[in-house]
Image: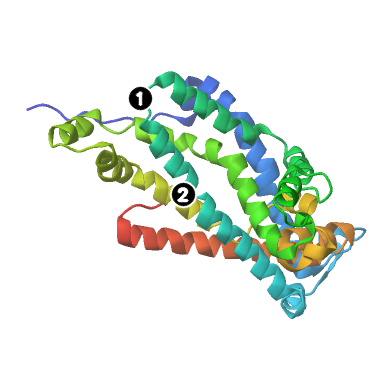
């Protein structure tokens, strides 16, 4: 009878010595996350205090949930939550399918040089600074000499001040986001498509399937797990909108639709130095995002057997 080999547990020191170069490569990333993502979590305790910079965390008085209560009783709370959710939802609804469709359609292009050229040009907007993107929008949409308004006037219409129209703000934000990010977001879908077994396409061709049928009945189902995982991650950001672009775009005329949680936190937390209040709002936002991603992950695991964790 063959004897079963007993696997010996390798001491931690030997593991570290064996993988020291790999650990050195990973160390900067780990250090980054520890310093800028995990360490700041300690300061969330400020949300439950009447924080005073001179007294610090240990000297500031404890107020419990008063800062959260103050936010929900604020006349701006509903508007902020509504605007944040609508902007994120519109961006998800219109922006999420675009890179998927782009990857599926471009995958059908047979000439490699055409495919590579289109891919390269689609990635470029992602590397343009948000400041430059907003500056370009303001130039093109200028009410006096913008190319869009000149075209409108040439067709007999009147000039529109796009950046002062509250109803238009969300559309400007969403479409500029799609233009800037769809190419970059499609990279992961191209990677998933490249992993599809070629034999599936060969079998489909034998059965008489055309391009559209191969796309919808082979490619799309094969990359569905990737789509679901990315969708779960995006749902977790439904109440999180980056303030950089909005601050560059909005003004008092568009506050009704443009003011979101992150811009409000910036104003009250940093500009007004109300750190406890700003931290409480930010913590509320994070908790809601965590709940959303857990719910989305649970529903996905229940109905599709695909989940993030």
Q: Is residue 289 left or right of residue 213?
A: right
SS category of the residue bearing label 1: loop
SS category of the residue bearing label 2: helix
Please name the residue shown 79% across and 56% down the image.
Answer: 161
**Nearest the camera: 31 or 4?**
31
* Residue 10, x across and y down, in percent: 40, 29
Check residue 110 in the rendering and tell me which mark sits there, or answer none.
1
* Residue 251, x across and y down, in percent: 82, 59
Q: Tell me: residue 49, above or below residue 286.
A: below
Residue 259 visible: no
Which colour style is shown?
rainbow
Q: Is residue 16 left or right of residue 179?
A: left
Is disc 1 in contact with disc 2, using a CB cutoff of under 8 Å?
no
User: Which of the two marks, 1 or 2, is nearer to us in this view?
Assistant: 1
Residue under label 2, please give it. 97
Please name the residue shown 15% across and 36% down the image.
Answer: 208
* Residue 105, x across and y down, in percent: 40, 37
Q: How many labels were placed on the picture?
A: 2
Neighbours of disc 1 within 10 Å: few (<14), some (14-19), many (20+): few
């Amino acid at each position: 009878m063959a004897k079963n080999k007993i696997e010996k547990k390798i001491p931690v020191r030997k593991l570290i010595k064996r993988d020291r170069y790999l650990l050195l490569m990973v160390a900067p990333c780990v250090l980054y996350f520890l310093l800028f993502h995990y360490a700041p979590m300690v300061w969330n305790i400020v949300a439950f205090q009447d924080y005073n910079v001179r007294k610090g965390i240990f000297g500031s008085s404890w107020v419990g949930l008063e800062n959260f209560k103050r936010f929900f009783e604020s006349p701006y709370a509903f508007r902020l939550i509504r605007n944040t959710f609508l902007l994120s939802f519109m961006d998800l609804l219109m922006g999420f399918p675009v890179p998927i469709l782009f990857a599926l359609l471009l995958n059908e292009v047979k000439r490699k040089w055409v495919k590579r050229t289109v891919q390269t040009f689609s990635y470029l907007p992602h590397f343009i600074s948000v400041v430059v993107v907003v500056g370009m929008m303001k130039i093109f949409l200028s009410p006096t000499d913008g190319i869009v308004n000149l075209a409108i006037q040439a067709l007999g219409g009147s000039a529109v001040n796009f950046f002062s129209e509250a109803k238009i703000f969300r559309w400007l934000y969403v479409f500029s986001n799609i233009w800037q990010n769809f190419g970059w977001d499609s990279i992961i879908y191209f990677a998933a498509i490249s992993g599809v077994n070629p034999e599936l396409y060969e079998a489909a061709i034998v059965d008489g399937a055309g391009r559209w049928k191969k796309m919808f009945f082979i490619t799309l189902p094969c990359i569905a797990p990737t789509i679901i995982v990315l969708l779960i991650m995006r749902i977790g950001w439904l109440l999180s909108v980056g303030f950089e672009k909005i601050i560059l775009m909005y003004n008092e005329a568009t506050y009704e639709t443009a003011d979101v949680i992150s811009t409000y936190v910036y104003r009250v937390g940093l500009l007004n130095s109300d750190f406890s209040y700003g931290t409480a709002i930010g913590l509320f936002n994070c908790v809601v995002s965590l709940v959303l991603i857990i719910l989305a992950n649970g529903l996905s695991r229940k109905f599709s057997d695909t989940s993030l964790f």
